[in-house]
Image (tube, coloured by chain):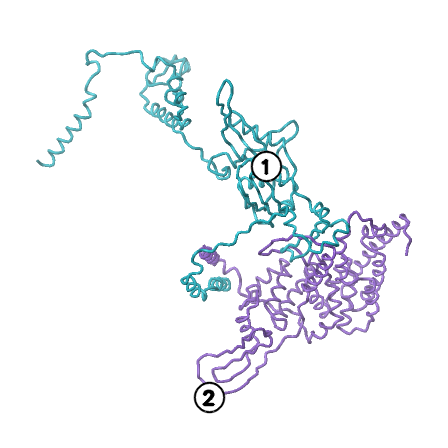
Chain colours: A purple, B cyan
Amino acid sequence: MSLLRYVRRLNALQGHQHCRREVSSAPAKSATLKYDQDPQPLFTDSETQRLLQSMTQLQLDKVFRKRTVKDNRSETKFMTNEQLETEFLQIIEKAKHLLKMPPIVKIKQDTERIIAKDPALKDFATTKYVFTDITFGLPHSERKVVVRETDGTLAYASLDTTKRMNQLYFPLEGRKSYTPRMFAYEELLHKCLEEHKYEFVLDRLTVQYEPYETEFHNLSARVFEHLNESKQFDLLRSTRHFGPMAFFYAWHRCIDDLLYDMIRRDYLHNAVELIALTYKIHKIPVEYTETLAKLEALHPTPDVSALSELRGFLRRPEEKQGIEQEIQTAIGKTEQDFAADDISLKFIEEYIASEHSLKKVQLELAVQTLKEINLEKLQLFQGLKKAHGVQAS
Amino acid sequence: MNLASIRTICQTWKTSTLSSPFSIQPSLLPNIFLRNTSFFNKLPAEDIWRGVTAVSNAGKKRGRGKGSGKKVAKDLNKGQTIGLGKNNCIWPGLNSPIIRGNELVYQQKLSENLDRENGIFKLRDSLSNFRMVKLSSIDRGWSGSKMPGRSIGPPDTVGEEEFSSFDTRVLENKIVFIMKGNMGRKRRYSVLSVTGNGNGLGGFATVKAPEVRTALRKSKNRAGQKLINIDLCENRTIYHDFFTGFGKTKIYCFKKPEGYGLICHRAIQTICKVIGIKDLYAKIEGSTNLQHIVKAFIIGLMRQKSYQNIANETSLNIVEQRNARNGYTEIKAIAPISPVQETKKHAVDIMHFTLGNKIVLQKKATYPFYVDSKGHKLFQIKEERFRNQANVRLHKLVNFYG
């Protein structure tokens, strides 16, 4: 039966062969923007990481969204409150793990490392011999692969060969030993990008290539460039690729579109962090640590806010909420948020006024609109508080 | 004897045999006895036909005439029109106008029409042949053209109540007998049907009537009057696994994920389709009496508890972890604050709770007899090297495609 199905699958494939010529064989274009220095020290810096994580946000609904899986079983369980509490912590840990960013490192150059030259072995065989250490449990980077050339030279294998051998003996799930067509042909890659399947492309890229490979840099840059044009940044928010994307824009000084998106969606603290990151990367002498510290005091980190969101589910509906709480949920902002917004807006306006911003008019307009909305909200907030007789703290 | 002589003999033989009956002229035969009274002109057509198509009462009691309904009385008048007959004639005023233009039409004999008679015979033949009605596969029920499983449309409108989104399906259609004081054994048709709107509303009814059609109609309309609301989980399945029974019928129903389908008895399948349940596994133990299955299943559906009710009863929170959401814990119901929870360190299994502490017997997988044989082991060893071949070939094709 399975054989029959397989034969049918093959036939279907062969049936499609007439479409072959539709896909042009042009290889994927290379990106225009490249990291000119080693970005790794700046990227792995703890402050940068914190900024990037904060910008990524942790929307549980996005991280744990419904996906197509082979086995979509579900399990219903009884849980006590304590069990739920530990479960919440585990969820946050899992989410943080899922949001771990792929590192940005410089491209590794292939160097020839000869171990020995044995002219006596010349023409011993007509082909090269590759020797691989297949000890169980070694990390891929430490696995030794050596090649005996036909001229008798014994040398460490090139990066390409090493990767291939690793994949051969210890296959990584999802990684192919050939270049996936999606990455090989410009037309197919372009199609993916046009359909805004950024996360899919980046996920597959992360599986297929190591972060130090040229293809990884090239293709991820292509995706980010395309994204900067289509401005669909929200597609990557709360995924592991948002951080590298923000870092890429900050490095190449093209944050304005992302900034505009953040202001428009009222993620002002993220906007501040993005600007601060740009200042940090390009060593622009603007004091940002103070503003960041202030904001940090007012704003919880993404995992803390996600945890409190989870704990919010546990609140019983019959439990009486304070009137203040009710007002806050109705407006969607707390007093702290308003205070934080003031600080962030000041910082953002400073940036817009400086020579570093490129799309001044657009950004100013966005800030102005947001200010008006915020003012209205604030007035409503205060009015409601007054009407309910809540003491202004 | 040469060839020509044989031919002549043959021909003469042919002509002699064929022409002999025609050569005798009836008028030449002496003393023909005519009997003008016969079976055919003494009895009315109805009685004569009954002789052919029906079985006598005594015969019926003995079980004769099982194929009744296959033989049908022919309407011999069909295809015949007044004025048109064996003799193709023009009868003014009967089959033609009396005056055509300015001329008077006279009676006139036309050439004989042979097709007419053939046509009538053909028509009669087609009347007599009983044919099973072929149903389109969409209208088909559980089996052939039998009623069970077939749709009989929505219940009839009552006043202003319309049942436009409803669909009724027959579950059982059988003949039942009762004894009457004056009529003896009386035959009736019993129809069990289920109706529903595919969105949580459903009802069923058993109705008896002397005719199949009336029974179907009455059962459909009665089912429409006895609707019950059944809450569907995520608009596709049941809230939790449950056990239900009626009489000797025991049913275990299990909640299943999206796309699982209905894996259960055909009656339960039909009920589910009509009500709107899409994913369910049900196992029947004991009697498979259809009426009992239907009652047991509907009772089970009605007895389902909402998550909040279960949480209140057990004072434990209820969560759902879906593989499709990477095991994310969705809170379904929160228990009221109570000191009981603190003592319950080991949370009970929700399946045990909803099945009423029953444990479903999971049979061990049975393997074919050859699994442990030497030959099979050898075969596996030989096959091992080809275990990935199909995949590799497929990927190769994919890779070189384009």
Q: Are marks 1 and 2 on the same chain?
A: no
Location of residue B95 with respect to A109 vertically, above or below: above
Q: Where is residue B233 in the image (x, y as percent from the top left)?
A: 65, 45
Residue ID for mark 1 = B295
Residue ID for mark 2 = A120
Indicate the quadrant containing the C terminus of chain A: top left, top right, bottom left or bottom right: bottom right
Question: Which chain does tag 2 point to?
Answer: A
Horizontal side of residue A23 vs A283, given as left or right? left
- Amino acid at circle 2: Ala
Q: Which of A129 and B143 is in front in this view?
A: B143
- The answer to whether residue B402 is visible is no
Residue A370, label in figure: none
Q: Where is residue B172 in the image (x, y as percent from the top left)?
A: 52, 34
State how many labels appear.
2
Using a 10 Å C-alpha cutoff, classify the residue at mark 2 as few (fewer than 14 neighbours), some (14 to 19) or many (20 or more): few
Q: Where is residue A61 in the image (x, y as percent from the top left)?
A: 70, 56
Q: Where is residue B103 in the image (x, y as percent from the top left)?
A: 39, 13
Q: How far apart are marks 1 and 2 (CA)?
A: 90 Å
Using a 10 Å C-alpha cutoff, classify the residue at mark 1 as few (fewer than 14 neighbours), some (14 to 19) or many (20 or more): some
Q: Seen from this angle, which residue lies furthest front?
A: B343
Horizontal side of residue A210 vs B6, given as left or right? right
Location of residue A79 with respect to B287 vertically, above or below: below
Task: Give the residue at x 45% y 67%.
Answer: B385
- Amino acid at circle 1: Lys
Horizontal side of residue B1 vs B374, given as left or right? left
Question: Which chain does tag 1 point to?
Answer: B
- The answer to whether residue B328 is visible is yes
